[in-house]
Image (spheres, rainbow, N blue to C red):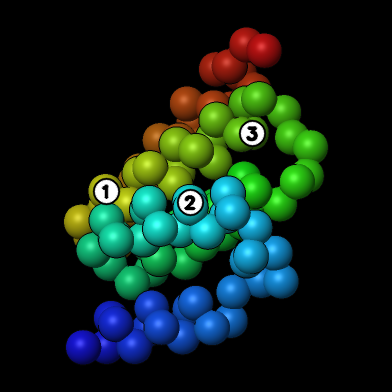
Amino acid sequence: MFRFSYLAAFFLIAPCFANDDAYQQCLQEYVPQVEIDRAVLVVKQRCESLHSGDIMLPREKARLQCQLESAAKAKTEAGLDMLMKVCDERHSFKNHQD
């Protein structure tokens, strides 16, 4: 029950660009997959970053996409932390070639 009230509040305080179709589509695609509350915030933040219109390096975009997909699949808080770290390492400067 708390999860649904948390999600309702989340959508009410969405950023001003929340009307952007790509941002909304991102939320609609990934939020229903989320199983832990903290992952909802990660999904929201990554959708915001990916669809804000800011210019970013391909490696940064790939890292954010990796974290978005991983957050939607995480089953535990520890798993979420581990998956975020894996995405950071996979898409770091030393491991990525643009």
- Does dot 3 land on a helix, a strand or a loop? helix
Amino acid type indicated by mark 1: Lys
Position above or below: 11 against 60:
below
| Residue 81 can be seen in this image | no
Depth order, front residue of 42/19: 19
Q: CA distance from mark 3 to mark 1?
A: 20 Å
Query: What amino acid type should be assigned to the residue bearing mark 3?
Result: Glu
Question: Does residue 73 sit above or below 38 in this rendering?
Answer: above
Q: CA distance from mark 2 to mark 3?
A: 17 Å
* CB atoms of marks 1 and 2 within 8 Å: no
Q: Secondary structure at mark 2?
A: helix
Residue closest to the far right = 55
- Of the numbered discs in the image, which one, if any, rests on residue 60? 3
Q: Is residue 65 visible in this depiction of the protein? A: yes
When the figure is inspected, residue 15 is found, relative to residue 20, above or below; the finding is: below
Measured in 3D between alpha carbons, the distance from the residue under mark 1 to the one under mark 2, in whole angstroms, is 15 Å
Residue in view at x 54 percent, y 83 percent: 12
Q: Amino acid at mark 2?
A: Cys
Q: Which residue is the extreme one toward the top?
A: 97
Residue 26 badge: 2
Work out whether mark 1 precedes mark 2 in sequence or the reverse, and give the earlier one: 2
For the N terminus, the image quarter is bottom left
- For residue 97, what is the image quadrant? top right
Q: Would residue 18 be found to the left or right of residue 36 on screen?
A: right
Q: Quick one: 11 or 37, which is closer to the camera? A: 11
x and y, in percent, of residue 64 in the image: 54, 41
In this rendering, would 21 be left or right of 37? right
Q: Which residue is denoted by mark 1 in the rendering?
A: 73
Badge 2 crowding class, 10 Å Cα cut-off, few under 14, some 14 to 19, many 20 or more, is some
What residue lies at 45% left-to-right and 36% top-to-bottom? 66
